Every structure is written in structure tokens, then in C-alpha cells.
Amino acid sequence: MKVAFHTLGCKVNQNDTNNLMALFQKQGYQVVPFGQPADVYVVNTCAVTHVGERKSRQTIRKAIQNNPEAVVAVTGCYAQTAPEELAGIPGVNLVVGMADRPRIVDLVAEFRATHRNQIQVRPNRATWEEMPQSDGGERTRATLKIEEGCDQYCSYCIVPYARGPVRSMPPEQVIQSIRGLLAEDYQEIVLTGIHLGSYGKDCSSSLAQLLAEIVALEGRFRVRLGSIDPHEIDAELVETIVGHPDRICQSLHIPLQSGSDRILKLMNRHYSLEEYAALLGALRAGNPLLAIGTDLIVGFPGETDEDFDAMAAFVREQAFSRVHVFRYSPRRGTPAARLPGRVSAAEQERRSRVIQAIAAESGARFAREFIGRRVQVLFEEQEGSLWEGLSGEYLRVKVEAAGELRNRLVPVLITGSHQDALQGII
């Protein structure tokens, strides 16, 4: 039996898909590319924006067209928040919510036996969901999801409704999982979660405490952190991150979302611009070359020209290494969807371009700071004699080298930059 997967949305969703693949493979299924004929298609959907929902529906219809006789199973955030809507698409056989993902292979088998469509969507669990962890076939870095759920309830966000409350993988299980990955010769472990900074709130631990255990493990490896909200980065976590540059990647993604205190309050974010700037100052005091990326939403309801100008000025001032810009998309059932003062699509697009231009300039300037310095690069790809990999600061680096460098952490002297990558020598 052949199964094909397609993932929409965030890196956590991709990790979830990898784990679903492992469930099917354990039962003897062969995983094939999504565009090929398969007996089962699994679409892992996104509901963060209306674009994500639209692309999810398009992907579902493509799966049905690929093989009208196949079983089509839909899961993910969109499935959790609007199951009836997805079940109404002709050709969809199963809609599987978050709590029932571990049963997805059995649900497929049940459908094949009965030919009865099902919606299996329940409220999310309050405890950690046991799923097999899989790398998805990547052999240099492994992504380990250690947290699920969010209880922040930002006014624009549907994720808490889709993913449920915070649940943390027990610390001892995290350590055991990392030891297993190191035994498989992974050089980089990416810790991820829906709201990573909330790790440990439900099990008397914290992200800082967990990292202290991880950095003490033996072996040559490094840890990369997923996105962390600013109000969850305390002094202990700052000290842990900047105090272990050889073990913890010196790259953080800290969502800002708006450059206006007024808009931050409307968003139900839990910090001010002053607090955010102070946090970045503390991090850079520990490591002036720490890479800091962020997320921004342009066109939030009520965002005036003055609010946007303040955002642009703040982004210039903070000199982020990378910025992800999102245009506001109303999510049904969220408080922000009821706010007045909608910003037109054309103005959202204009504001997005302005921020992207500022971000491109600051990102290039940050990368140039490393010319003449050595960085640790994990090499992944080869084209002829040219090897390419990522530094701990999430900078793409290329070198000319003979021999095998794949899955090796190598110190590289940066000599220049070209297009989207730094150049260096070993």
C-alpha cells in the first residue's frame, strides 16, 4: 500500500507529518511523493491565515484528482477548527482532529472496510500526546517537538483553539530522545513546539532547566531553538543561551508582531516595545553577534499610518537578521475579527514591501559582520566541489572543498558574501 503526504503551514506541522509518516511506515505502507498515485493521501492542513485555508482546500482537491479511488484523510489545524467544512468537500473520507492523530492508520483501515466517511474530532488533550518521532528522512539535523498547544490567546490567532492547552514532553523523555538521535549521528537537534517558551509549565520544569540538562550531554552536537515569545525569555534563559555558544545555536526567533504599543494591546500580546527592546539589549550584551529574527503582522485592524511608521522605525533600530512579514488575515471566532478599522489589501501589500526592504538591508548588514570571522557550519548539500551548510547563526555558507563534508560540523573562515550566501574557506 502506498501513502502520500502534503503539509501546509509551520515547521511544527511538518514535524507532525513526519511522525504520521512513521505511523504508516510501521504498518507497512510505502511513502511516495504527493504527485504520484497512492492508495491513501494525507493532507496536514493550516488555518493560521485564509491563504493557508485556501491552499489546504486546493491541496485536498488535488489529492482527490490524483486518484479518485484513494482514501483521502485530512488532519491539522483546519481539520480541528472547521471539520464539517472539510468533510463537505466531495471525495474527503476522513477528517481527523489532533487528539485522534495516533489512530489515523486504524481509521484508514476502518474506512477501507466499511466505506463510511468519518469525522473524528474531539477537544484537545490536556496531557502530552505520545507519537513516534521521525526525522522525515533528513540525516543532518533532527527536529524534536517537545511542546504542544498554546494558552496565550492573542486576539488574532486561532492556534489555541486548534492546538489546545500547553503540554510538554517530560524532561527525562526529551533527554532520552536526544540521546537516541545522537546515537544516530545527528549533529543538530532542533527543539520545536507550538509555544516553545511555555515548555515545562505543566510539569514543574522550564526551557532553561531543560537546556541546562541538554548542554551537559556528551558528544559533538548543537541545539537550535524554535520561536520563543519575548515575555517568556527570562534572565536565566538569556544566560543559558549566550553562555553556551558552542552548544546552543546563537540564533533566536522572537516574534514582535507590531511596532506600536497600542496595537500590541489590541493584539493581546504580553509585552511593550520598551520591554522587547530591553530583552534584545540583554541578549546582545551577552553576544553582540547573536542572530535575532522576528515575525510582524502588517495591516492589523486599526493600524494607522502612524502605527506603521513606528513599526518601520523600530525594525530599523533593532536591525533584525531576518523578518517574516504577514498580512493580517481575520480568523473566524477570534476577537480581532470583530475589530473595526480594516486596512485594505493594497495598503497591506505596500506596508509588507516596506518592511521586507528594511529587513533585507539589515539582514545583509548582519551577514557582513561575519566576514573575517570563523563560524561553525553544518554541511548538508554538495554541488560539484561546492559544499553548502548553515552556521549556528542561521547563515547560509558555501565553501570549495574536496572530500566528504556532509553531516559534519566544521569551523569556516568567512571571506565574503555572494547573493544569498556567505563564502568561506576551511
Image (spheres, helix red, strand yellow):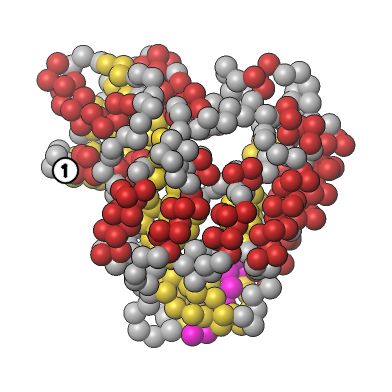
Q: Is residue 230 magenta?
A: no
Along the line of sight, which residue is nearer the eye, 420 or 264?
A: 264
Q: In the image, what residue type sits under mark 1?
A: Lys
Please give the name of the residue rendered at 18% of the width and 21% of the height, measured from the top-left corner: 111
Please give the name of the residue rendered at 84% of the width and 42% of the height, measured from the top-left corner: 309
Along the line of sight, which residue is nearer the eye, 200 or 357?
A: 200
Left/right placement of residue 304 relative to residue 235 reads right
Please give the name of the residue rendered at 13% of the width and 42% of the height, measured from the top-left corner: 28
Residue neighbourhood size for the residue with mark 1, other residues' Cα within 10 Å, grouped as few (<14), some (14–19), many (≥20): few
Please give the name of the residue rendered at 20% of the width and 31% of the height, measured from the top-left corner: 105
Task: Relative to 4, say whether 219 is above or below.
Answer: below
Q: Position of residue 101 (x, y in %)?
A: 30, 30
Left/right placement of residue 153 relative to residue 341 reads left
The majority secondary structure of the magenta stretch comes to strand
Image-quadrant location for residue 367:
bottom right
Q: Position of residue 299 (x, y in %)?
A: 73, 32
Image-quadrant location for residue 280:
bottom right
Whether residue 54 appears in this view of the structure is no
| Quadrant holding the N terminus | top left
Q: Position of residue 346 (x, y in %)?
A: 75, 33
Secondary structure state at the residue bearing disc 1: helix
Along the line of sight, which residue is nearer the eye, 74 or 104?
A: 104
Q: Position of residue 261 (x, y in %)?
A: 79, 36
Residue designated by label 1: 26
Task: Relative to 148, say whether 215 is above or below.
Answer: below
Whether residue 195 appears in this view of the structure is yes
Which residue occupies the extreme front position in the image?
204
Q: Over which residues does the magenta segment extend?
A: 419-426
